[in-house]
C-alpha cells in the first residue's frame, strides 16, 4: 500500500489465476480464499501488477467473468533470477553430494511436487524412453505432493534411472543445474516458470510443455526451447530421446542474452519504476 495525502493507494501483485481457472490443481481452501480475496480487493485496488503478460491476461478474464471493476491500472513486473556461478560444496552433507557422485549428463526437473507440475506426464513418458541418462526430480511436496512423491519412489525405474530429492538446499540445486544435460519443464500451468530462466542462465538445453507462459518467456528472452505437444507423454519421450542423441548438450549462452536476463535487483528496480510512474 502507498499512502497518498490522506488516503491510500493499494497495489495488488497478481501471480496467476490457477485457483480460479484450474481449481483441481489447488486445495479447496486455497480456491475459496483466492476468489474471496481478489473479489473483495477489486473495489479498492489502484493498480494490478502481474508477473507476466499471460498472468495479466488471466487477470482481465477473471475480472470480466466476475463483473468486477476494471478501471484500475495494469502493469507487468519484470521477473528476475539469480544463479550463482560459484558452487560451495562444504555446506552440503556427504549423502547429498553422493546423489550426484556417479551421475553426469542427466535430465533435470525442478519444481514443487503438486498436480499442476506434470510429474504424471513425466512418469508415463518413461514407458517410451530408451536412454542411458538418468532423470532427477527436485522439489518439495506441495498440494497432493505426498501422493506424487509416493508414485515417483515406487516407480519401477526409481533408484535406477529415476531419482527424487525432496529437500534440496540451494547449493545442491546449483550442482544439479551445472551437471545436467537438459532441464525439463512438464508443468501444465505457471504464472512465470522460473526454472526456464535458471536453465538458460546455465546454458542448458530446455524441453518444455507447450503452454502459453513458456512460449512468452522463451520469446521475450530469445531462448532456445524444444517444445513438446501439450501434456503428451509420447511427445515428451521423443523430445528427451532427441536431446539424448545430440552430442553437444551445452548451449553456450551469448553474452548479450545473459545481459538481457533480469536479476532480482532488476525486479526491484522494475517495481520502483511502476510505483514512481503512478504516484
Image (tube, rainbow, N blue to C red):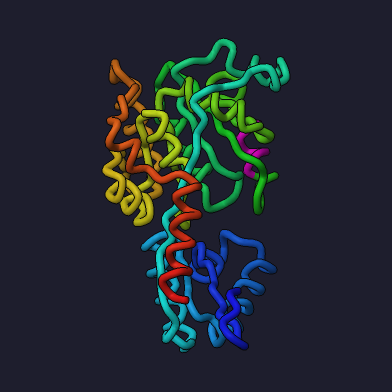
Residue name at image x 53 percent, y 15 percent? 103
Q: Where 222 sits versus 161, above or below?
A: below
Residue name at image x 58 percent, y 75 percent? 2
Residue nearest the viewer, comparing 103 with 123: 103
Taken as a whole, is the magenta stretch helix, strand or loop? helix
Can residue 150 be found in the magenta stretch? yes
Residue name at image x 61 percent, y 32 percent? 170
From the image, which quarter does the N terminus lie in?
bottom right
Q: Is residue 191 left or right of residue 250?
A: right
| Residue placed furthest toward the front | 5
Image x and y of residue 164, in percent: 62, 30
In which image quadrant can residue 24 be found? bottom right
Image x and y of residue 36, in percent: 63, 79
Q: Could one spot residue 59 in this view of the protein? A: yes
Residue nearest the viewer, comparing 205 with 75: 75
Residue nearest the viewer, comparing 121 with 114: 114
Q: Is residue 277 left or right of residue 116?
A: left
Image x and y of residue 107, in percent: 45, 27
Q: Could one spot residue 154 in this view of the protein? A: no
Q: Is residue 98 left or right of residue 237?
A: right
Segment tinted magenta in the rendering:
148-153
Image x and y of residue 231, in percent: 40, 48
Q: Is residue 104 left or right of residue 25?
A: left
Can residue 98 be found in the magenta stretch? no
Q: Where 53 sits versus 93, above or below?
A: below
In which image quadrant can residue 257 be found? top left
Amino acid at each position: 500500500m502507498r499512502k497518498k495525502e490522506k488516503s491510500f493507494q493499494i497495489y495488488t501483485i497478481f501471480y496467476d489465476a490457477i485457483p480460479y481457472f484450474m481449481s483441481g490443481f489447488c486445495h479447496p481452501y486455497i480456491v475459496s480464499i483466492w476468489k474471496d480475496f481478489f473479489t473483495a480487493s477489486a473495489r479498492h485496488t489502484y493498480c494490478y501488477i502481474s508477473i507476466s503478460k499471460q498472468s495479466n491476461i488471466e487477470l482481465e478474464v477473471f475480472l470480466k467473468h466476475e463483473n468486477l471493476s476494471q478501471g484500475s491500472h495494469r502493469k507487468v513486473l519484470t521477473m528476475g533470477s539469480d544463479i550463482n556461478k560459484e558452487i560451495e560444496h562444504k555446506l552440503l552433507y556427504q549423502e547429498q553430494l553422493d546423489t550426484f557422485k556417479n551421475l553426469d549428463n542427466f535430465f533435470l526437473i525442478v519444481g514443487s511436487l503438486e498436480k499442476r507440475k506434470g510429474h504424471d506426464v513425466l512418469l508415463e513418458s518413461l514407458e517410451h524412453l530408451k536412454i542411458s541418462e538418468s532423470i532427477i526430480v527436485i522439489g518439495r511436496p506441495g498440494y497432493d505432493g505426498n501422493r506424487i512423491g509416493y508414485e515417483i519412489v515406487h516407480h519401477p525405474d526409481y533408484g535406477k534411472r529415476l531419482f527424487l530429492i525432496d529437500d534440496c538446499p540451494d547449493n545442491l540445486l546449483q550442482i544439479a543445474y551445472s551437471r545436467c544435460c537438459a532441464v525439463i519443464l512438464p508443468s501444465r500451468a505457471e504464472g512465470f516458470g522460473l526454472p526456464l530462466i535458471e536453465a538458460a542462465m546455465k546454458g542448458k538445453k530446455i524441453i518444455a510443455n507447450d503452454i502459453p507462459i513458456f512460449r512468452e518467456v522463451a520469446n521475450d528472452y530469445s531462448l532456445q526451447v524444444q517444445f513438446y505437444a501439450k501434456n503428451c507423454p509420447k511427445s515428451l519421450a521423443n523430445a528427451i530421446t532427441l536431446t539424448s542423441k545430440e552430442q553437444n548438450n551445452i548451449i553456450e549462452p551469448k553474452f548479450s542474452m545473459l545481459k538481457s536476463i533480469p536479476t532480482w535487483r532488476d525486479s526491484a528496480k522494475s517495481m520502483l519504476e511502476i510505483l514512481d510512474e503512478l504516484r
